Amino acid sequence: MFRWIILFCLLLGYEAAYAHQPDLSSTMLVEQADNEWVLQVRSALTAFQYEVKYHFGDSAYATPEEFQNLVLELVKENILIKFNDANIRLDSGMVRLGHETNVVFKVSGTPKDIETLFVKNGAFSHVSRNQSALILLKKGFQKEQFILNFKNEHTVKLRATTDKFVLDTSIKNETQAYLLIFALISLALATAVFFFYKNKSNNEVVLIPSKPAVSTN
């Protein structure tokens, strides 16, 4: 009980922060019942307005209802969630407008046994210095929070253990491997180009122009 009281207080703190700072947001995945999940995205209204304007133009909406529909489209197009490398669906979207605006979707297609979880939220990627707190609430699991920002391209891949989600370091290792391969290929190409031009310069015959004959007459 004490743990949930602390969580409730933390969420209240998040609400106060997000209502006034457009660069902060939260992305919450919550298991409400056995294998029934919802997604909730919270941020300042100004952040949603900025992204809607960026994606759809200045005159894309004229009423609050039209704005809400664009917000739902924005979130669905820029959030990707995968359980066990399989895409899930976001259904039954709802927007609650306010200084802090909430977007809620029902998550469909989640597997019963979760091994990995991939989350990308680029909905606020054009807001300067934006970062989103990814909060995971699953029955029987510890509450976990991860930060999505420019450095990790607003993505995170996690592994499920017996009672919590942990970062999957395989992405980092794969990235390092690709960078190493790219560096080796670049070095090999640079070396080949160097020896090509070196051999070409060594094989060139330098022609020295002859002096015109001097007439003795």
Image: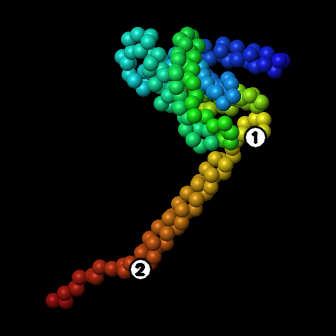
Residue 84, can we see it?
yes
Q: Tell me if residue 168 comes above or below residue 194 in the rendering.
A: above
Q: Is residue 190 left or right of residue 147?
A: left
As shown in the figure, which amino acid type bears the numbered disc 2?
Asn
Kind of element beneath mark 1: loop
As shown in the figure, which amino acid type bears the numbered disc 1?
Thr
- Quarter of the image holding residue 137? top right
Q: Quadrant of the C terminus?
A: bottom left
* Residue ranking furthest to the bottom: 216
- Residue 163: percent from left, percent from top: 78, 35
Mark toward the start of the polypeptide (1 vs 2): 1
**Residue shown at 57% from the left, 17% from the top:** 102
Q: Tell me if residue 14 comes above or below residue 147 in the rendering.
A: above
- Judging by the rendered image, the residue that carries numbered circle 2 is 203
- Judging by the rendered image, the residue that carries numbered circle 1 is 161
Q: Closer to the observer: label 1 or label 2?
A: 1
Q: Residues within 10 Å of mark 1 (few under 14, many from 20)?
A: few
Q: Tell me if residue 56 comes above or below residue 175 in the rendering.
A: above
- Residue 26: percent from left, percent from top: 63, 23
- Quarter of the image holding residue 53? top left
**Residue shown at 63% from the left, 37% from the top:** 111
